[in-house]
């Protein structure tokens, strides 16, 4: 360990990234003390319900994986030297309030000692203009790894490169669009964790063909706005193929994953260091996949069952679904004769 710390300091210093690390500690929202979402709930019941029941923002400080990951980093005898919980709370909300990314995190804190109407006219209304731009979401939905500076989460730059951006569609126009019965901009920010049906229709599989010992198929990301999975390496989309014989017995399986993969910081592990591979499906991308079939005549499949699922990992950045703590129900399931 005596050797390791100087090594790490050298590594960090040689890339002159202390700035970069301190950058991660900067609050992505306004400082000051919060009153909590209950205050807003008394007049904005519908928005409050959408946020608290559907959005993952309301879980951002509470989820088990988050609390576990914060502890792991802070308590680690090496990582703890340069990474601490202020980094995590700079995007996930206030530790002491423990409501995740709440109304005041995004809209600003209530001005103390003045009627709430004044906070509306002095702060909430003037801020809305900036908040309707994707740059506002980017503060938290775009981030870099501390040392290499590779994009850890790239939802914003993905969006910038998308057709949706070119046609003027913003994060807000897709994610906060009013639905039936909404009086105000939708605040559910749908997440897979709370509603497994949200990706229905967003990913398609087509042109399934077999030829010369391979199976070919096309997978398409139909979200015009960004990659799937969106964001960083904590989400892994997997295409799972089960090859069957005539009677339906399983002969063999294959899995193809779509994810960002990072190599970890040497020696310390757990800290994403450099982007090693990115197989996320870009917006509107159609990708042809080829799966080799065995030469053994006894293993010639007659049917294939195709399932798409999303996996979630927390402190693991190598795209390994076996370390997932959560897996979705099938987003799509098809059985095809070969
Ligand atoms: C006493 C009732 C009340 C409380 C409490 C309240 N609001 Fe409002 N809010 C209103 C009313 C009424 C409007 C609509 C009138 C307006 O647009 O100013 C409104 C409008 C808004 C708007 C839209 C402003 C605009 O110009 O369109 C935002 C944003 C907002 N509130 C945020 C909040 C947040 C965040 C909280 C909690 C910190 C909160 N409000 C608490 C009554 C309230
Ligand atoms: C203050 C930081 C912050 C801002 C600003 C912010 N988000 Fe988030 N958002 C988060 C965090 C943190 C999470 C993950 C919460 C968790 O699961 O622990 C999240 C989760 C989400 C999710 C669910 C993601 C998933 O993988 O389950 C969506 C969708 C989302 N945000 C959209 C938006 C949009 C659109 C905007 C801009 C209008 C926005 N966010 C602004 C911090 C922020
Ligand atoms: C730049 C903003 C930002 C910072 C800093 C940040 N996060 Fe996140 N985090 C997010 C966003 C946004 C998501 C949602 C997934 C995505 O889009 O990648 C998320 C998702 C997560 C998740 C998966 C969601 C869940 O609850 O299972 C975990 C775990 C997590 N973050 C832990 C941490 C820890 C630990 C730290 C501090 C070392 C940290 N985050 C720092 C923005 C941030
Ligand atoms: C992740 C950031 C985020 C969180 C959390 C958030 N808001 Fe908003 N809110 C926005 C954005 C962005 C807009 C502007 C949306 C638009 O007009 O497209 C907005 C708009 C509003 C409006 C005006 C809507 C309209 O249609 O005129 C009200 C009212 C409001 N928010 C209240 C709240 C309350 C109350 C909470 C907490 C329960 C809350 N917000 C939590 C980002 C957030
Ligand atoms: C053209 C519409 C569109 C645009 C633009 C768009 N998104 Fe999305 N996004 C979606 C759809 C559709 C999904 C799939 C889940 C759903 O239906 O909400 C999604 C998923 C996500 C998720 C993952 C949710 C989960 O649980 O897996 C995050 C995070 C997210 N978007 C953030 C953003 C941010 C930040 C921006 C702007 C930089 C943005 N999106 C722009 C349509 C869009």
Image (tube, helix red, strand yellow):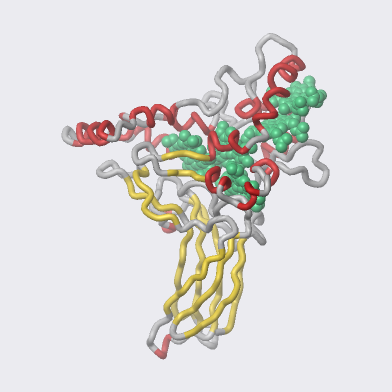
Q: Position of residue 281 (x, y in %)?
A: 52, 58
x and y percentages locating residue 67 in the rendered image:
47, 36
Residue 59 appearing in the image: no
Residue 231 appears left or right of 121: left
Q: Residue furthest front?
A: 166
Q: Quadrant of ligand 2?
A: top right
In the picture as drawn, the residue positioned furthest to the top comes out as 113
- Determine whether, in the image, residue 174 is placed left or right of residue 245: right
Q: Residue furthest bottom?
A: 297
Q: In this picture, is 114 found above or below 55?
A: above
Q: Is residue 261 above or below residue 213?
A: above
- Horizontal side of 204 relative to 84 (left or right) equals right
- From this view, report whether residue 128 is shown above or below residue 161: above
Placement of 56 over or under 13, stated as above or below: below
Viewer-proximal residue, 272 or 62?
272
Q: Position of residue 14 (x, y in %)?
A: 25, 34
Residue sitting at x 70%, y 22%: 126
Residue at the location (61% across, 66% down)? 204
Q: Residue at x 39, y 27 (%)?
A: 22
């Amino acid at each position: 360990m005596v050797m390791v710390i100087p090594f790490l300091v050298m590594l960090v210093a040689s890339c002159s990234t202390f700035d970069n690390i301190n950058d991660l500690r900067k609050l992505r929202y306004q400082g000051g003390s919060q009153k909590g979402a209950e205050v807003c709930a008394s007049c904005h019941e519908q928005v409050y319900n959408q946020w608290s029941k559907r959005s993952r923002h309301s879980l951002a400080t509470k989820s088990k994986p988050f609390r576990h990951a914060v502890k792991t980093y802070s308590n680690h005898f090496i990582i703890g030297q340069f990474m601490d919980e202020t980094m995590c709370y700079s995007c996930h909300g206030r530790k002491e309030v423990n409501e995740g990314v709440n109304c005041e995190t995004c809209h600003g804190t209530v001005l103390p000692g003045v009627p709430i109407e004044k906070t509306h006219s002095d702060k909430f209304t003037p801020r809305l203009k900036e908040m309707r731009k994707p740059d506002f979401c980017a503060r938290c939905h775009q981030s870099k790894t501390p040392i290499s500076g590779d994009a850890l989460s790239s939802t914003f730059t993905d969006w910038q490169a998308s057709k949706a951006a070119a046609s003027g569609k913003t994060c807000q126009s897709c994610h906060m669009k009013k639905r039936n019965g909404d009086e105000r901009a939708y605040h559910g920010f749908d997440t897979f964790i709370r509603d497994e049906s949200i990706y229905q229709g967003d990913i398609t599989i087509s042109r399934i063909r077999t030829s010369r010992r391979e199976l070919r198929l096309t997978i398409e990301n139909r979200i015009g706005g960004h990659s799937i999975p969106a964001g960083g390496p904590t989400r892994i989309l997997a295409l799972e193929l089960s090859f069957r014989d005539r009677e339906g017995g399983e002969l063999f399986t294959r899995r193809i994953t779509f994810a960002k993969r990072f190599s970890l910081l040497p020696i310390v592990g757990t800290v994403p260091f450099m982007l090693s591979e990115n197989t996320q499906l870009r917006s509107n991308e159609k990708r042809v996949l080829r799966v080799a079939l065995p030469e053994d005549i006894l293993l010639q499949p007659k049917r294939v069952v195709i399932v798409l699922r999303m996996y979630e990992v927390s402190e693991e950045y190598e795209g390994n679904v076996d370390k997932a703590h959560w897996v979705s129900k099938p987003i799509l399931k098809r059985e095809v004769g070969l």
